[in-house]
Amino acid sequence: MAPVLKTSEELQIMREAGRIVAIAHEEMRRAIKPGLSTKALDTLALTVLRDHGAEPCFLGYAPSDHPPFPATITACINQELVHGIPSASRLLQDGDIVSVDVACFYRGYVGDAAFTHPVGEITRSARRLVAATEDALIAAIAASVIGNRISDVAKATAKRAARAGYSVAREYTGHGVGQAMHEEPQVPNWWPGRRSKVQWQDYELLAGMTYAIEPMLIAGRPDLMELDDGWTVVTKDGSLTAHCEHTVAITEDGPLILTLP
Ligand code: MG
């Protein structure tokens, strides 16, 4: 199914949904410190969403091969790449990096964004990884212009990651966002060669297209595994990862970031 193009009225609502997510991000960034549990972050995000009349997308989300997700945010520490389950016994420690993803429904539309944040004092190499991930997101957003294709967005991420000496997660991609949390197109962080078994639909970017771009950079090898909780994905070699995400709209005036405060 081709990507759903949104009207300017729909983009206005999506901007509101995105703004609520961004406010939750700001609150969580302010709260992050050593000793805080990931469950406390989750409670904070849920409160912000509900205070603004929004509902969490992840809570109860149950794709066929997974148990229902039990929280508002995903919280991933260090070698955890995506889908980490918040826990009252999981405390942030000085030197960790924590990646938080949150999506909400607001007036029938979705906003979806993620960030990686330092906990206390982090190493220079961790700082460099987080900066490279944010840099890759900015490059991919800049490539989100009419006349380009999804492959141009994917290659922008891949190029920045490679230039900084990092791998990207190949199994997980960004995605179209609208009335559903996952729509067409898929927005990968790399683009396969012609002989690869993986192929994505290389849509032309059109005004009104809305999608989440989410670079996931890995300091070591890109091999991943899922933990026994049925959700948390970690790097097999235990190497550090970072993840950030914005929902953007393609417009005649260039890319519009929908997930800003
Ligand atoms: Mg997300």
Image (cartoon, rainbow, N blue to C red):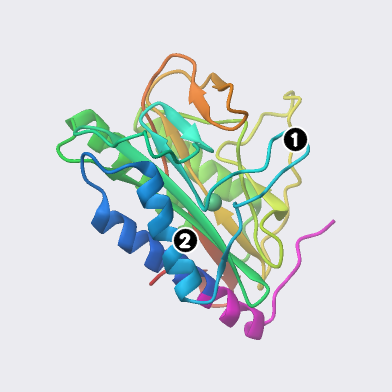
Q: Quadrant of the C terminus?
A: bottom left
Location of residue 224 by image quarter: top right
Task: Please report the bounds of the magenta region as a residue range.
Answer: 1-16
Q: Residue furthest left?
A: 121
Q: Residue furthest bottom?
A: 9
Nearer to us in this view, 11 or 195: 11
Location of residue 7 by image quarter: bottom right
Query: Which element carries disc 2, helix, strand or loop?
Result: helix
Q: Residue furthest front?
A: 88
Question: In the rendered image, which residue does mark 2 sit on?
Answer: 46
Give the image location of residue 46, x and y in percent.
47, 61
Give the image location of residue 228, x and y in percent.
59, 21
Asked whether the viewer can see residue 144, the reply is no
Q: State the mark number for residue 83.
A: none
- Residue placed at 30% from the left, 35% from the top? 91
Decide whether residue 3 is among the magenta residues: yes
Could you tell whether 35 is left or right of 61 in the image?
Answer: left
The mark that comes first in sequence, 1 or 2, is 2
Query: Which element carries disc 1, helix, strand or loop?
Result: loop
Question: In the rendered image, which residue does mark 1 sit on?
Answer: 199
- Gap in angstroms between the C-alphas marked 1 and 2: 36 Å
Mark 1 burial class by Cα count in 10 Å: few <14, some 14-19, many 20+: few
Could you tell whether 180 is left or right of 212 in the image?
Answer: right
Could you tell whether 153 is left or right of 241 in the image?
Answer: right
Mark 2 burial class by Cα count in 10 Å: few <14, some 14-19, many 20+: many
